[in-house]
Image (tube, helix red, strand yellow):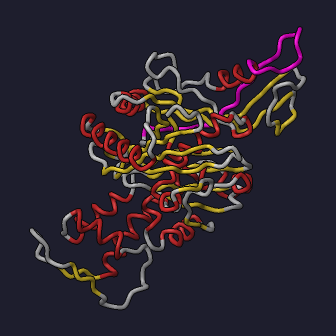
C-alpha cells in the first residue's frame, strides 16, 4: 500500500466483517477497488466479546479484500459502534492575546480543546469533536476562521465519546494482525459521509444505519451534526424473535426474514402460508405469512419508537427538510421505509453509498455503507477539507492522554 491515494475501511460488524479498498482519484472522486467479507464471530451488539475468534474473522476479510483488489493492506480506518457511545453539543471559547488580533490554527485547536473541557465518565474517552459552527466576535456561520481578525473565537462542536477499553479492544484486535490503525470513526458518522449529499445535510436529514446487532443514527440540521448515537438493537434481534416465536432454527429464521419477510401488515391474503421444506434435523413446517410479518413489524416498530424517544430529547426532528435515510443490512427488509415514515411522520428513503464508484455490487449494497464511508472519511482527512468539520483526536488511546 505504498500508494498514498489508497485507503482501506474496516467494519467489524455483528453479522459480518467488511473490508473496503478505495482509491482517491485526481478528479476528487472515490473509486472502490475491492471488497472483502467474512462471517462475523466473537462480536455481539457491535462489540468484541471473543478476541481470538474475532481476530481470525478480521484476518479472513482482510485477505479476501487483498485478493479482490490486488492490494497489500498495511493500514486501515476502523469503525467503532456499540451502545456505550454517547454524544453531546458544547461550545468552546478562546480570547486572543492583546498583542495579536489575527486568528491562527493554534487558536482553532485551542477552541476545540476548550470545548472538550467538560466532565465525562472517568472510563470514557473522546472519539470525535465535529465542528458545527465558528463565531468570530459574534459573527455567526464562519466556516474557517484562520486569517480572520477578531478578539474572541467561539465554536460549537458535536462531541462523541465512549468507553475507552471497548474502543481499545477493537484497535488491539486490528493491531495484532498486524495492521496499523490510521484512525477510528463512529460507524454512523462514516455511513453519513456517503449516503448524504451536502445539500441534504444543509436541509436537515436523519441517517439510520441498521445492521445485525446495532442501529447507528446521525442527525444533521443546517449542515451540522446535532445528534448521534447507537442503539443495541438490529436485524439479529428480529431473527431471534422469529426463531423463538415460530420455533424454528436461527439459520432458518434468518433466511425466512430476508427472503419472505415484510414490515407491512395486512398486505397478504388471509391464511396465506409459507412452506419451509424439511432439512437435516428439521422436519419442515408451514408458517402463516401474516404471523411472520407481525413479528418483524413489532420488533422494528419498537426499535424506531425507542430511537424517536431519544431524538425527541432535542428539537431537531421538526427540521428535517430532506427527510430520513435508511441504510445498512436491515434496510433491505420490505417496507421498512414506510414503517419509519409512519412512526417519525417524516418522509423516509432507502439509500446506499452515493459518493463512490467502482465495484457496483458493493457501492449499491446498503450493507457496505459504513465501510465505504470509512474510505470516504479517509479521503476527506487526506485532502484536509476544513469545511467538512472533522477533528482528528485518535492519538492517545494507548497512552492514556485523552
Tell me: 142 left or right of 334: right
Q: Is residue 357 above or below residue 3?
A: below
At which x and y percent is residue 47?
Answer: 36, 40
Q: Is residue 126 above or below residue 143?
A: above
Which residue in the rendered view is the most extreme toward the bottom? 270
- The answer to which quarter of the image holds residue 157 is top right
Residue 298 x/y as whole percent: 39, 68
Instruction: Give the residue displayed 44% in from the left and 42% down from the top.
Output: 10
Relative height, residue 301 to residue 278 (above, below)? above
Looking at the image, residue 334 sits to the left or right of residue 112; the answer is: left
Which residue is pictured at 45% across the width and 47% down the height?
69
From the top left corner, tell me how far across and down residue 111 is, in percent: 71, 23
Please identify the residue farthest to the top as the structure is shown. 99
Q: Which of the two residues, 10 or 301, is positioned nearer the viewer here?
A: 10
Residue at 52% across, 54% down? 309
Q: Give the vertical position of 177 relative to 210 (above or below).
A: above
As for residue 105 lying within the magenta part, the answer is yes
Q: Is residue 202 magenta?
A: no
| Residue 323 image position (x, y, % from top left) | 65, 62
Residue 123, quarter of picture? top left
- Between 256 and 243, the one lying in front of the other is 256
Q: Which residues are magenta?
A: 84-106
Q: Is residue 163 left or right of residue 161?
A: left
For the question of whether residue 332 can be seen, the reply is: yes
* The image quarter in which residue 301 lies: bottom left
Task: Identify the residue at horizontal 70%, vertical 50% (top origin).
Answer: 221
Whether residue 305 is visible here, answered yes or no, is no
Amino acid at each position: 500500500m505504498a500508494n498514498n491515494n489508497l485507503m482501506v475501511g474496516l467494519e467489524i460488524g455483528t453479522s459480518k466483517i467488511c473490508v473496503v479498498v478505495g482509491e482517491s482519484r485526481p478528479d476528487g472522486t472515490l473509486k472502490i477497488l475491492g471488497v472483502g467479507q467474512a462471517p462475523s464471530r466473537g462480536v455481539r451488539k457491535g462489540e468484541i466479546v471473543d478476541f481470538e475468534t474475532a481476530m481470525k474473522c478480521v484476518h479472513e476479510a482482510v485477505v479476501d479484500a487483498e485478493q479482490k483488489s490486488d492490494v497489500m493492506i498495511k493500514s486501515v480506518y476502523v469503525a467503532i459502534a456499540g451502545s456505550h457511545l454517547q454524544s453531546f453539543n458544547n461550545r468552546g471559547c478562546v480570547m486572543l492575546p492583546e498583542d495579536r488580533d489575527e486568528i491562527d490554527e493554534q487558536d482553532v485547536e485551542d477552541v476545540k480543546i476548550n470545548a472538550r473541557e467538560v466532565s465525562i465518565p472517568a472510563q470514557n474517552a473522546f472519539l470525535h469533536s465535529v465542528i458545527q459552527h465558528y463565531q468570530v466576535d459574534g459573527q455567526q456561520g464562519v466556516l474557517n476562521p484562520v486569517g480572520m481578525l477578531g478578539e474572541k473565537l467561539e465554536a460549537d462542536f458535536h462531541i462523541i465519546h465512549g468507553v475507552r477499553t471497548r474502543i481499545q479492544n477493537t484497535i488491539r484486535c486490528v493491531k495484532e494482525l498486524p495492521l496499523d490503525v490510521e484512525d477510528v470513526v463512529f460507524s454512523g458518522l462514516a455511513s453519513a459521509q456517503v449516503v448524504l449529499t451536502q445539500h441534504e445535510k444543509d436541509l436537515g436529514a436523519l441517517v439510520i444505519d441498521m445492521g445485525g446487532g446495532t442501529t447507528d443514527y446521525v442527525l444533521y440540521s443546517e449542515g451540522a451534526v446535532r445528534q448521534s448515537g447507537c442503539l443495541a438493537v438490529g436485524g439479529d434481534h428480529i431473527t431471534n424473535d422469529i426463531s423463538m416465536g415460530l420455533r424454528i432454527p436461527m439459520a432458518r429464521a434468518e433466511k425466512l426474514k430476508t427472503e419472505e419477510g415484510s414490515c407491512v401488515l395486512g398486505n397478504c391474503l388471509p391464511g396465506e402460508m409459507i412452506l419451509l421444506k424439511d432439512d437435516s434435523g428439521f422436519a419442515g413446517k408451514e408458517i402463516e405469512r401474516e404471523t411472520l410479518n407481525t413479528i418483524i413489524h413489532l420488533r422494528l416498530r419498537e426499535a424506531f419508537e425507542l430511537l424517536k424517544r431519544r431524538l425527541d430529547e432535542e428539537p431537531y426532528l421538526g427540521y428535517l427538510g430532506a427527510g430520513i435515510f435508511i441504510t445498512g443490512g436491515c434496510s433491505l427488509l420490505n417496507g421498512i421505509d414506510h414503517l419509519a415514515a409512519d412512526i417519525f411522520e417524516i418522509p423516509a428513503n432507502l439509500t446506499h453509498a452515493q459518493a463512490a464508484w467502482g465495484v457496483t455490487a458493493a457501492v449499491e449494497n446498503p450493507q457496505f455503507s459504513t465501510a465505504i464511508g470509512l474510505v470516504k472519511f479517509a479521503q476527506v482527512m487526506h485532502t484536509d477539507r476544513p469545511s467538512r468539520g472533522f477533528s482528528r483526536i485518535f492519538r492517545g488511546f494507548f497512552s492514556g492522554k485523552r
